[in-house]
Each structure stands twice: as C-alpha cells, then as structure tokens.
Amino acid sequence: MVREILIWPDPILKQKARPVAKVDDTLRTLVKDMFETMYSAEGVGLAGPQVGVLQRVIVLDTTPSQPDSKPIAMINPEIIGMEGETSYTEGCLSIPGESEDIDRAAIVTVKFLDVDGQEQTMRCDGLLAIAVQHETDHLNGTVFVDHVSTLKRELIRGRMKRFKASRERELGASASR
C-alpha cells in the first residue's frame, strides 16, 4: 500500500524515531509499504518518520546508480564507522523539488537488523553511503536542509509551506467533486 509522504516542516519529521522492539509481520508489512511508497515517488530511500511512523526503519534502493546493489531494508540502523569525505547534491521525498550540496562521509559501515530479525553489518559507499546517512538523519529528527545555511533553509521552508497549501487545495477540490 502506498502511504502518504509527510512534507517538511511537518513536526513529525523533527521527532526522534523509537527503536523497533520486535521484527514481526506487522513490521514486514510496513517495510513492504515503504518500498511501494518509495518506488511510487521515484526515490532511492525512505525512513519511517516520512510516512508518519516513528520507528527506526529505513528502505533503500540505489540500483539505478549502483547496479551491483540491491533493495535493502534496515531496522534499527546504527552507523558504526565513517571514512573520508564527499559532497553530494541531495534531494528528499519530504522536500519535493529541492536539492542542495551536503557534505557527508564517503564510506559508512552500518549495523542493522534485516526483515528476518538477523543482525547484519554492511560497508556502504557511493550513493548508498549517502542514502544511509540521509535516512538515518530522518530517524534522528534531522532533514537535509538542517545541514544548509539558515537563509537557504528558510527560503525552502516558505516554498514547502506554499507547496503544502497548494496540495491541500487540490485535494479539497477533488474531494468535493
């Protein structure tokens, strides 16, 4: 099921997500829904808070840029190592139409549970490393515009508020038909 993606500055996006206590069928359904939502929006990553679920779950698929990678869900991800530096022009499904250059680690090592509840450790580079850091930020109540200047952030905030108002008007108009 495709879920609604929250648009920043929705207050839920500023909250810290809780660790997942149990990997079960309810959680696997959430992961499936998150993948469907991410693909529907043509994204490469999505975090639980972006769909209004304050649980430490992220889904990622960087195969268009990294053909050797595969779709992956990470439950309770924890970055345990960072190497090097890189800058990447990031966008976000919760901040549509916006992108900014963000400085990140070039390589990250992340520990997480898979959808079977098994602990995994993965070394990530390229877009996958960027996406892991970006989505882990979401779990901690941070969005990519928190990494840019106050002026840029406030300009983007104004555009997102207008975007949300426009979307709500469109939804209201289609509901009254």
Image (cartoon, rainbow, N blue to C red):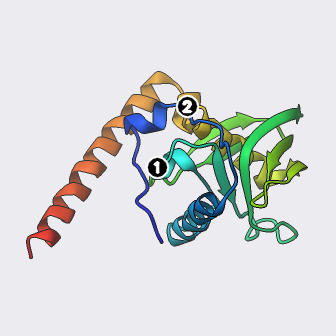
Please name which of the two marks, 2 or 1, marks the residue nearer to the observer: 2
Image side of residue 134 versus residue 129, left or right:
left
3D distance between C-alphas at marks 2 and 1: 16 Å
**Looking at the image, can residue 138 be seen?**
yes
Q: What is the x, y in percent for residue 106?
A: 84, 41
Q: Which residue is mark 1?
A: 94
**What x and y, as percent, mark residue 64?**
73, 71
Q: Residue furthest top?
A: 150
Residue 16 is labelled as 2
Q: How many marks?
A: 2
Q: Amino acid at mark 1?
A: Ser
Q: Which mark is residue 127?
A: none
Q: Residue at x 29, y 42 (%)?
A: 161
Dot 2 or dot 1, earlier in sequence: 2
In the displayed orientation, state which residue is furthest to the bottom: 177
**Which residue is drawn at the image coordinates 67% and 42% (left, top)?**
21
| Three-letter code for the amino acid on which mark 2 is drawn | Lys
Secondary structure type for disc 1: loop
Q: Nearer the viewer, residue 134 or 85?
A: 134
Residue at screen point 22% across, 49% down: 165
Q: Within the image, what quadrant is residue 32 found in?
A: bottom right
Give SS at disc 2: loop
**88 or 16: which is nearer to us?**
16
The crowd level at tag 1 (other Cα within 10 Å; few <14, some 14-19, many 20+) is: many
Residue 3: image location, x then y, percent:
44, 63
The answer to whether residue 64 is left or right of residue 137 is right
From the top left corner, tell me how far across and down residue 127 is, in percent. Answer: 76, 54
Q: Quadrant of the C terminus?
A: bottom left
Q: Eyeballing the image, is 123 above or below 16? A: below
